[in-house]
Amino acid sequence: MRTLLAIPVYNEARHVRDVLAAARRYSPDILVVNDGSTDGTAALLAAEPGLHRVDHPTNRGYGAALASAFGYSLARDFDVLVTMDCDGQHEPARVPVLLEAIHDADIVSGSRYLRDFRQDSAAPTDRRFINATITREINARYGLGLTDAFCGFKAYRREALEKLRITETGWGMPLQLWVQAARQGLRVKEIGVPRLYLDPTRAFGGVMNDPEKRLAYYRGVLAAAERDVLPGLPAATPVACPGVC
């Protein structure tokens, strides 16, 4: 089974070398999507041998970086794509757990709320509230039974990637993913991963720093995802979600 480990990177000069050093222990094929970094990340990556690499000339967004990883993996016939962030939240040592779990699933997603770990740290209050709210709304609409709608630590079978049409370029990309996965009938599984916030004051940027506007944006992504045109499927009929949507 050919596996590609993809890491979207934007201004991660502080973490990228340590993350790559740890990741190399668990995957011989590592793709870095450098999403227009301006802090010296590109120079650090240039000194790293043997990487697969995609460079966005300017910052296009988290979702755009992952979409580039999806396309790269498909174009090179990898069987499984694993994605993880570069800010220290995801431990590369958990990659084998994701790969073990995908034997009977199409998408395996890490969850920071499925179980407790000794090294867990407290999530910022607004992030925990928004995550719980959006996760509940997705489950009410689509019955996925998720506990963490936003974790970027995931494994995808090639067959799952072929059915997705990701167009959301921002932080709400995982929500479009879940709507499409549900509509396509993909098998979804969660595994517990530690909840690590190394810098709880780290901001999203722009209007996303406002929790109310961030929540409204996420709900907008969900609504738009229900209108996505997917291969072999009619347009979705929105499912009523009284009292929470």
Image (cartoon, rainbow, N blue to C red):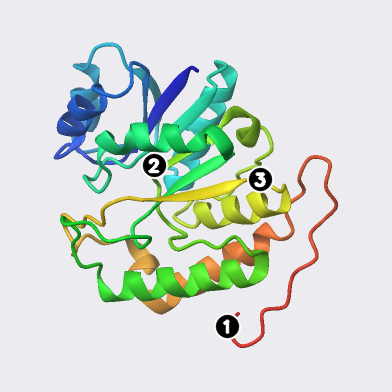
Asked whether the residues under the numbered discs 1 and 2 touch, taking CB atoms below 8 Å apart as contact, a structural biologist would say: no
Q: Is residue 57 visible?
A: yes
Q: Is residue 210 visible?
A: no
- Residue placed under numbered mark 2 in the picture: 59
Q: Is residue 109 above or below residue 197?
A: above
- Residue placed under numbered mark 3 in the picture: 186
- Mark 1 Cα shell of 10 Å, populated few (<14), some (14-19), many (≥20): few
Q: Give the CA distance from mark 1 to mark 3.
A: 25 Å
Tell me which numbered mark, 3 or 2, is placed earlier along the sequence.
2
Q: Position of residue 237 (x, y in %)?
A: 80, 65
Left or right? Give the position of 153 relative to 46. right
Q: Secondary structure at mark 1?
A: loop
Q: Nearer the viewer, residue 26 or 152?
A: 26
Asked whether the residues under the numbered discs 1 and 3 touch, taking CB atoms below 8 Å apart as contact, a structural biologist would say: no
Tag 1: residue type?
Val
Q: Nearer the viewer, residue 176 or 99?
A: 99
Tag 2: residue type?
Asn
Tell me which numbered mark, 1 or 3, is placed earlier along the sequence.
3
Q: Nearer the viewer, mark 3 or mark 2?
A: 3
Q: Position of residue 120 (x, y in %)?
A: 20, 59
Asked whether the residues under the numbered discs 3 and 2 touch, taking CB atoms below 8 Å apart as contact, a structural biologist would say: no
Q: Position of residue 90 (x, y in %)?
A: 28, 44
Q: Secondary structure at mark 2?
A: loop
- Residue placed under numbered mark 1 in the picture: 244
Left or right? Give the position of 39 relative to 149. left
Q: Is residue 20 above or below residue 97?
A: above
Q: Residue at x 29, y 11 (%)?
A: 50
Q: Give the CA distance from mark 1 to mark 2.
A: 33 Å
The quarter of the image holding the C terminus is bottom right
Q: Give the CA distance from mark 3 to mark 2.
A: 31 Å
Tag 3: residue type?
Leu
Left or right? Give the position of 140 relative to 198. right
